[in-house]
Amino acid sequence: MLQAFQIQSYIAVVKVRPTKLKFRVVLFYVKNRAKGCLNDKQCGIILVYNHNPIICLEVTFVHNKNVVEINLNALASNVTNLLAKYDQYDYYIGVVKGNAYGHGFGIVPTLIRNGVNYLAVSSLEEAHVVRKMNQNVPILIMEPVLLEEIEMCLAHRFTVTVSNFEYFEKLAQQPVREEGGPLKIHLKLDTGLNRLGIDDQSKLEVVYQQLKKREDFYLEGIFTHFATTGVTDPLFDRQVAAFLTLTENLDLSQIPVIHLGRSATLETREKLAFATGVRMGAIMYGINQTFRPYVGLKGKLRKVRDDYRKKKLSISDTYSSNDLEVTTTFALKTPVMEINRVYAGESVGYGGTFVAEKDTYIAVCPIGYADGLHLGLRHSHVAFHGKKFPIVGIVNMCMITVEVDATVKVGDLLTVLGDEVSLKKVAQLTQTTPYVGMTQVNKDIKRVYVGEETDLDGRL
């Protein structure tokens, strides 16, 4: 039989036979150990006492921590393809908020090497981590920072967002040191998303005029955020019109970075003539738009409906297809901790929600909702060597159970999200988005960077 022992950060799975001895010291040895391998054999000693003594015949070590593999080659290719296809911008802003969409900030060097020349984060805390990765790249903090943190932003050359008039009034009363140069500011406008941003034209003009007069402030950018792509609704066009109205008395030619577009609008819309920058988020990580071609009878009927809607709502032209090539860069993997033989009619897990229809094998993996898995994954599957195996029973706090076949062994790494397990399909299954699936994965799970050369020794 197989028995598992926790040894430091590993689980030793040992083939054993009972004995009657009270004490037993078991020695096992290194065999074909490879750096970074999660299922290699290693040396050690097991002391067995009293009622369950064993003699070790064979040992397989299973690292009990899950892993997120980040494909840096795919990331580099995605960014290169984006910049080649959409080459009319001056500023390519890589959005790395939310722990870089769950990828970890170890991707920053790859983004910069391949042409991203500005980065955007949500918070000051994220900005600090990114700054450690690169001392020179401009970093925009897209949420307002506390006034007492302004000096810190200046010291680390962070760009701050001004998103309401009252905040600016307080900021303007606060003296700013000039040793680090002027504080770079991007103005956020609310054009219809109704989240953050200045939505009053007169107040915006007051802010603009004051910034022009101040030597300790530098108005580097202005931006808004679109609620939709506007493919089948008028919101996009309304927001563009609102932006132009708000800024009609501003000299946009004197503001270097004007960024409205995001990943989804980049694929579906022509470049706005006045825009000089674009924010690239999900698209960098291989999450692109799904275009439904107008083929077959249903497709033709859908085209008639869409054309009528566009005409009725005066929706501007959009792209109905896109040949941009991107690849998913994120893959969550978990090792097989134990394999149990389950016979026809037996149930698995809490509530007995899965009942085996035939004799089968159930793999137990050390990952669950405490690690960020959605409960809806009970209806999903994992992948291993081109095969897909269903997750059975409910998702536990720290474990899942998977119905496998005899080709799966203890120590094998199964893919839970990414690669052969489509992030888009999982998002549909769980009624979320691919961003949710990636960012919910616990930060404590190690991100391992594979492919392109990295200064992080493959880890962060």
Image (cartoon, helix red, strand yellow):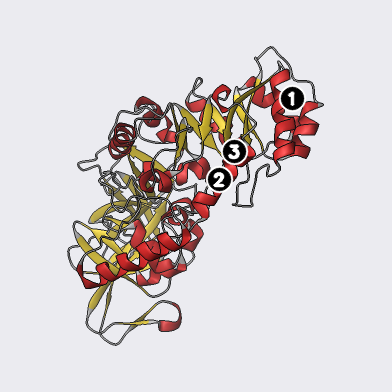
**Helix, strand or loop status at disc 2:** helix
Furthest residue in direction bottom, as rendered: 345
- Mark seen at residue 142: 3
Q: Residues within 10 Å of mark 3 (few under 14, many from 20)?
A: many
Under mark 3, the amino acid is Met
Q: Are marks 1 and 3 in contact (CB under 8 Å)?
A: no
Question: Which quarter of the rendered picture does the C terminus lie within?
Answer: top left
CA–CA distance in space, label 1 to label 2: 25 Å
Residue under numbered circle 2? 241
x and y percent of residue 202 in the render?
Answer: 74, 37
Residue 182 in the image: x percent, y percent? 66, 18
Extreme-top residue of the structure = 179
Label at residue 210: 1
Q: Quadrant of the N terminus?
A: bottom left
Residue in the foreground of this view, choosing between 129 and 427: 427
Above or below residue 327? Residue 431 is below
